[in-house]
Amino acid sequence: MTEKHCNEILSKIENEIKSAGLKVKIIENPDGKLLRTAIPCGSSEEFTALADMALVTLGSGTELVQIYFTLTAELSEEASAELNKAFPTLNFYSIIGSYGIFNSSQVYFKYAVALSEAADVELHASEVLDAYAVAHESLCAAYDVVMAMASGALTYADAVKNELLPEM
């Protein structure tokens, strides 16, 4: 993917997200550019998760978008242990995407999707926005439970007992 094509896609996505009333910015980093926005999730109407989208070209030439949501960057060892018990269930039942913990304290949800081979900015922007919408919906389905566990207010056993998570 050329830098120009990538910039055009990110610009289109940025405009779409802004038109939905969300703040968004494009960030430059050593690996390229990413688009970042804060979004509401779960039962909260507030901006509760940070969403990053990056366009990537693999060595094979396959182009994809990675969508990465940061739920929290503060996590106790106890909460981490409880979430690690829950992640296999959450990841199995998630529509798309997967949960995990990065650097012992950052709870994330991520999803990646390959883009079509056509060099069409409109099509690629549409594919990215569709993937973003589905990933966001999947994240929101379990967000409240994940955050209750991340804060230490809920254990995995209690989540299963109260039928907030299915037992596996």
Image (cartoon, helix red, strand yellow):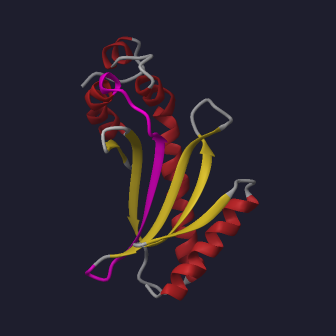
User: Can I make out residue 95 in this image?
Assistant: no
User: Is residue 149 left or right of 10 when viewed as pictured?
Assistant: left
Decide: is 64 above or below 87. below
At x 53% / y 44%, what residue is drawn? 137
At x 41% / y 19%, what residue is drawn? 152
Count of numbered tags: 0
Decide: is 31 above or below 151. below
Image coordinates of residue 160 in percent, x first then y, are 34, 17
Decide: is 46 above or below 153. below
Image coordinates of residue 166 in percent, x first then y, are 33, 23
Image coordinates of residue 70 in percent, x first then y, are 47, 46
Determine if the magenta segment contains residue 48. no
User: Is residue 134 left or right of 92 when viewed as pictured?
Assistant: right
Asked which quadrant contains residue 164, the reply is top left
Which corner quadrant holds the N terminus?
bottom left
User: Is residue 104 left or right of 129 when viewed as pictured?
Assistant: left
Asked which quadrant contains residue 44, the reply is top right
Image coordinates of residue 42 in percent, x first then y, are 57, 33
User: Can I make out residue 76 in this image?
Assistant: yes
Which corner quadrant holds the C terminus?
top left
Determine if the magenta segment contains residue 70. yes
Q: Give the residues drawn in magenta, as a range.
A: 59-79
Decide: is 136 above or below 57. above
User: Is residue 11 left or right of 148 when viewed as pictured?
Assistant: right
